[in-house]
Amino acid sequence: MNSNYSTTILVVALVLASVAIAGVPGAVSAQESGEVIGQPDISFATATGEVSAGTADELSIAITNRGSIDKGGPSQYENRVTTARGMTMSLDDSNVPIDVQAGELSIGNVPTGSSQTTVPIEIAEDAASGTYKIPVEYEYQFSRVVDYDAYGTDYSDFTRTRTGSITVAVTDDARFEVVDITGTAQIGDDSDVSMTLRNTGAEIARGATVGATSRSNALTFDSGGPSATSYVGDWESGETRNVSYGISLAPDATQRGYTLDLTVEYQDANGISQSSEPMTAGVEAIDEQAFAFSDVDTSLRVGEDGEITGTVTNQGPQSAKSVVVRYADESATMVPIEESVAVGSLDAGESASFRLPIEVTSSAEASPNLIDFAVNYRNADGDRRAYDKLDVRADVAPERDQFTVELAEQTIETGGSRTIAVDVTNNLNETVTDIEARLFADDPLDTGDADTGYVESMEPGETVTVSFELTAASSATPDKTYPISFDFRYDDQRGNSQLTDTMRVPINVVESSGGGLPMPLIIGAVVLIGGAAAVLWYRRQ
C-alpha cells in the first residue's frame, strides 16, 4: 500500500514538473538556433493622374516594399531583414520639363506593404504631351542576415543605394491666362470691369464658364455676393474671350488695388469636367465721385423770398451727366420755391453756376443757418447717383417792412384839406405787381373817399409817389402830431397775393394860415346871408 502510494506521488510530481517547464516562455526556443536571410524589395509608382503643361500640381508617389526572404525563420527576424530603415529619396528632374519643388526626402522606416509621399511640382508651359520618367535615387539600411541561438542574436547590417524611376503623364489640355483688364472700381458706386483671357493650351475647352471671386468684403458683384460667373461657350486653343462683371465698391472702402480670383470650368475633348488652375486679376479703385460749392451768396430774410446762388464744381474723378443741384434741408422755416436746378453735364474739374429761390417763413429766427444740399447726377453707365455731403452757411436777416413810406410834406392845417404825396419804396428783393396802397386816419383826421392808390409794378428798390386826400377837422389841435397808417396789398413774384402789416407815419397839424376866416364865422355868415335873402324874398311877394 505504501509502495503504490509513493509511486503515484512520483508520477504526479514528474507530470507537474514537465507542465511547469512547458509553461515558461522561450524555454524551448531558447534551446533553438538558426539563420534568417532576406532583404527589402523597393519599387515606386505615381499615384497622381495626368498633369497639365503650364500648371503646378502635387505629385503623389506610392512606395511599395514587397520584401524578399531567402531563408525563413521567426517572424520578428523576417521583419527585420525585409524592412528598409531610415530611407531617403531624391528625384532627378534635370532631363524632364518638370520642376520638382523638393530636395532630398526623408521617408523613414519602410516595412513590407505600401506607403505614399507627395512632392510639389511645376510643369513647363512648353511641355509636350506624353510620359516622362523621373529617376529616383534612394538609400536605406537593412539587415541582410540574422543569426540567433541560445546565447543571443547577431545582425549583418548594410547600407544600400539604388536608383528607380517614376513615370509622369503630361497632357497639353486647355490652359488659360489673363491677357488684359479694363475698368476701375469707384468707391461708393457700381462699375464695370472687363477681362480678356486666352486659351494657351492645345485643346478646346467646351462649354466654358469663367468664375470670379473677390477676396475683399468691400468689393461685391452686381448680384450682391462675393462671386459671379460668365459663360463663354466653346473655347478653341489660342482664342481669346472677353468677360465682363458688374462690381460695387463700398462707400467706406479704401482706395487701393483689389484682387479677383478667376477659374475656368469646362469640359475637355473627352467630355470630362475640368477646372483650370486659379488665376488672379487686379482691379484698381478710384476715389468717390465728389462735388464742391464755391462763390456762395445768400439773400435770406425772415418773412421774405430770397435766394442762394453759387458755383458747383465736379471734383471728379469721373464725368457727371444731367447734374442737378438740390435743396436737401428739412427745416420747417425754410421752404424751397424751387427744390432743384439743373446745370447740365460736367466733366471732371468743370463748374457751373446755380440759383435756388428760398422762402423764409415769418416764424423763422434771424440767425446763421447751415443748409443741407445735394447733387444728383448720372454716372458713365447712365445710372442715377447722389452726392449729399454739401452744405451752405446762410445768414438769415431780421424781418423788415416790405415797403417804406415817406411824406413829402408832413403838415396839415387845422380845419383844412390837402393832397398828401407819399413816396413808397419797394424793400423786397423781387418785383411786385398790382400794388394797392391804402391810407387810414382817425378823428380828427379823415381820409375822405380818396383813401387808396394803385401802382402797376415796382422793381426791387424802386420808389414811386402815391397821392391821397387828407382833411384835418377844425377841432384838431394845432402843433400836435397825429398818426396816419398805410398798408399794402400786392402780388409777389410767384403770383401770390400778400398783405403787409400796417405802418404808422406821423403828420403835424398846424394853425391855419391868414387870408381866411375861421370856419365858425364862415358858417355864421352863411346863415345870416341866407336869412336876409329869405326875408327880402318874402316882402317882395
Image (cartoon, rainbow, N blue to C red):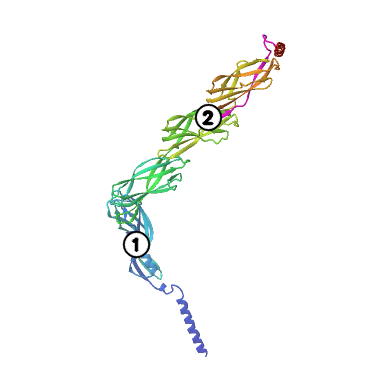
Outermost residue, bottom side: 1
Vertical comparison of 406 with 35: above or below = above
Q: Which residue is mark 2?
A: 495
**Residue positioned 49% across, 86% down in the render:** 8
Quarter of the image for the C terminus: give it.
top right
Tell me the element at label 2: loop
Judge the density around disc 2: few (<14), some (14-19), many (≥20) Cα neighbours within 10 Å: few
Tell me the element at label 1: strand
Check whether the beta carbons of the residues at disc 1 and disc 2 lie within 8 A of each other.
Answer: no
Q: Amino acid at mark 2?
A: Gly
The magenta stretch is 495-517
Judge the density around disc 1: few (<14), some (14-19), many (≥20) Cα neighbours within 10 Å: some
Near-viewer residue (196 or 17):
196
Can you give x and y, in whole percent of width and height, for residue 238 in the image? 28, 47
Vertical comparison of 539 with 220: above or below = above
Q: Which residue is mark 1?
A: 64
Q: Earlier in the sequence, mark 1 or mark 2?
A: 1
**Residue positioned 46% across, 77% down in the render:** 21
